[in-house]
Amino acid sequence: MEDLFESWETGDTTKDAILADAARAQTAMNHAIVNSKTDTAGLTFYYKGKALTSSVKWVEKWLDAGVTYIGTTRYFNPKVEVFDDKSAGASFCADETKAHNKDLKTGKVDKAPATDDSYVLYNTRLEKNEVGVWQTVDGTSARGSKTCTQ
């Protein structure tokens, strides 16, 4: 599994820090799925509150289904809005056309063709914690979003 982040630098120190931590949060989520664990250090470090609860439930769905994934997910078109010195919003697209589900028992890889649902729009809210990390505290995702389909 590989995460590629395209054009995730703006040149603005604050926005770049927010995007870097948003990317790390996404990678932490994927790491938890690939390792079939809901209690990874990355999840609890980069997510908190509602977002942490939702993230753990999302990983549990993968565990319950007995699947993981392999391949590459490309993240692109990031946008950041700084609300104040402790809160911000970040949105970005994911291209999962080269990522595939893999059955943990059989090892079989589902190579279903890509569709519009292979593209996901993420909208997140981040808050800066006491050590300066921008943690994801809330978020939504929309599969097949016209903003992201290519």
Image: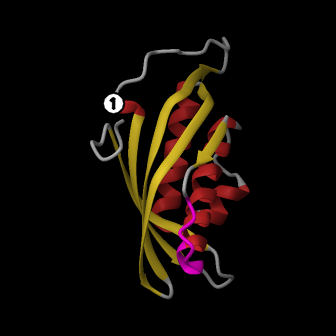
Question: What residue sits 52% from the left and 51% below the top?
Answer: 55
Which region shows up in magenta?
8-15
Q: Is residue 135 above or below residue 2?
A: below
Q: Position of residue 4 (x, y in %)?
A: 61, 45
Question: What residue sits 66% from the left and 38% below the top?
Answer: 2
Residue at the spot of label 1: 116
Task: Identify which residue, 93 or 150, lies in the foreground.
Answer: 150
Q: Secondary structure at mark 1?
A: helix
Q: Quadrant of the C terminus?
A: top left
Task: Identify which residue, 2 or 138, lies in the foreground.
Answer: 2
Q: Is residue 51 above or below residue 146?
A: below
> Principal SS element in the magenta part?
loop
Display colour scheme: secondary structure
Q: Position of residue 132 (x, y in %)?
A: 65, 81
The 10 Å Cα crowd at callout 1, few under 14, some 14 to 19, many 20 or more, is some
**Magenta includes 10?**
yes
Question: What residue sits 64% from the left and 85% below the top?
Answer: 130
Callout 1, which amino acid? Asp
Q: Quadrant of the N terminus?
A: top right
Q: Position of residue 27 (x, y in %)?
A: 63, 50
Question: What residue sits 56% from the left and 69% below the top?
Answer: 135
